[in-house]
Image (cartoon, helix red, strand yellow):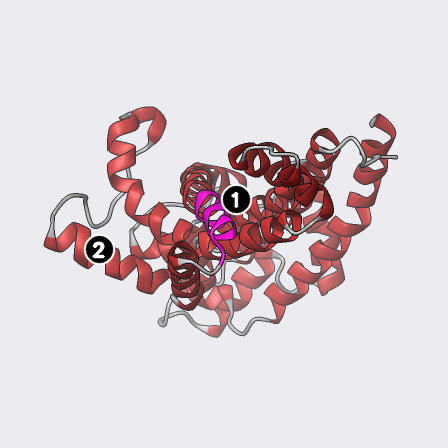
Amino acid sequence: MKKYILKRFLTLVPTIFIVSVVVFLLVHLTPGDPAAMMLGDDATMEDIAALHAKLGLDDPWLVQYVRWVGRCLHGDFGTSTAVIGQKVSDMVFSHFRPTLCLAIYSQLITVLIAIPTGVLAAKNRGKIADFIASVLSLLGISLPSFMMGLGLVLLIAVHFRWLPAAGYKDLFTDGLLPFLRYMTLPALSLGFIHSAYMMRMTKASMLEVLGSDYIKMARSKGVKEHAIIGKHAFRNALLTIITVIGQGFISALAGAAVVEKLFTIPGIGTLLVDSIEKRDYQVIQAITLLIAMLNVVINLVIDLIYGLCDPRIRLD
């Protein structure tokens, strides 16, 4: 296990290097001048040129890239070009907690909806439960998250007035109940979309296992159906479900921008959108690199969980 973890961490180095190059190039190829955005419409060409020199934007891209990577290796992601004097690391990590809480809450909703529904649909294939699950999954795949969020706002927040339409309350400073009141609608918007895909994968994986020979043998021996579903079929379908949960969590972190903007949540998605509008290169690079690194780490954790769940998988 230790040898496998060491090998995987060594593979992170070239992966992160390639990601950093791609992120740097994409950000710098984006049209727009951060210096002009900072100074406004009244800025002269001399003012813009002076700010370029101060921020190092006139240096060759290779020099800028090496300087940025060198700072990142020391935990310094630079200074924001939109908010003078503000460290990028402070901005990113102050906005990261709301996004992380939203991703965890939405994934909890996803699991609670998708796994029981997918198992029920597989158990009752061709019946009404299967039909309802198929309609729900098709609806979730078809609806974009912002449309789902607007529908929930109109129905639950505006019509019934059960929950607030927008805003944010921190879990650790404001308490659990205020957090749940303000985060339930955005978590539902994000979680229902991901639950559609997880529901379909759970159903497909369960159907594959339920059609295997050892399940037929267990039924012929008189093993009760709930034992077959829970003890035998679900455990063997668990690897696929774990993969979908991990990928769903990554998608929730990376794709929360629309939901955060809709519900005015001060997460990294909101910060990323604002930084793109202001051409804040340093913040955009830091957020994109952080999400990419989390993607790699989460995939490593998923592989380790595989080995714990299935002893047949050897992590060498």
Does the magenta portion include 119? yes
Q: Which quadrant of the rendered structure holds the C terminus?
A: top right
Q: Residue at x 72, y 59 (%)?
A: 21
**Frontmost residue, 206 versus 217:** 217
**x and y, in percent, of residue 53 in the image:** 60, 60
Q: Is residue 149 left or right of residue 63?
A: left
**Frontmost residue, 282 versus 40:** 282
Position of residue 126 relative to residue 97, above or below, is: below
Say if residue 182 shows up in the picture: yes
Mark 1: give few (<14), some (14-19) or many (20+) Cα within 10 Å: many
Q: Is residue 61 left or right of residue 37?
A: right
Label pair 2/1, CB-CB below 8 angstroms = no
Q: Which residue is mark 1?
A: 88
Residue 281: name its quadrant.
bottom right
Checking the image for residue 153, the label placed there is 2
Q: Is residue 237 left or right of residue 145?
A: right
Residue type indicated by callout 1: Val
The boundaries of the magenta stretch are: 115-125
Kindly report which numbered mark, 2 or 1, lies closer to the viewer in this rendering.
Answer: 2
**Frontmost residue, 211 versus 4:** 211
Q: Residue at x 82, y 44 (%)?
A: 11
Inter-mark Cα distance, 2 to 1 = 33 Å
Residue 266: name its quadrant.
top left
First along the sequence among labels 2 and 1: 1
Say if residue 47 shows up in the picture: no
Q: Main secondary structure of the magenta part?
A: helix
Q: Residue at x 62, y 48 (%)?
A: 210
* Mark 1 element type: helix
Does the magenta portion include 31? no
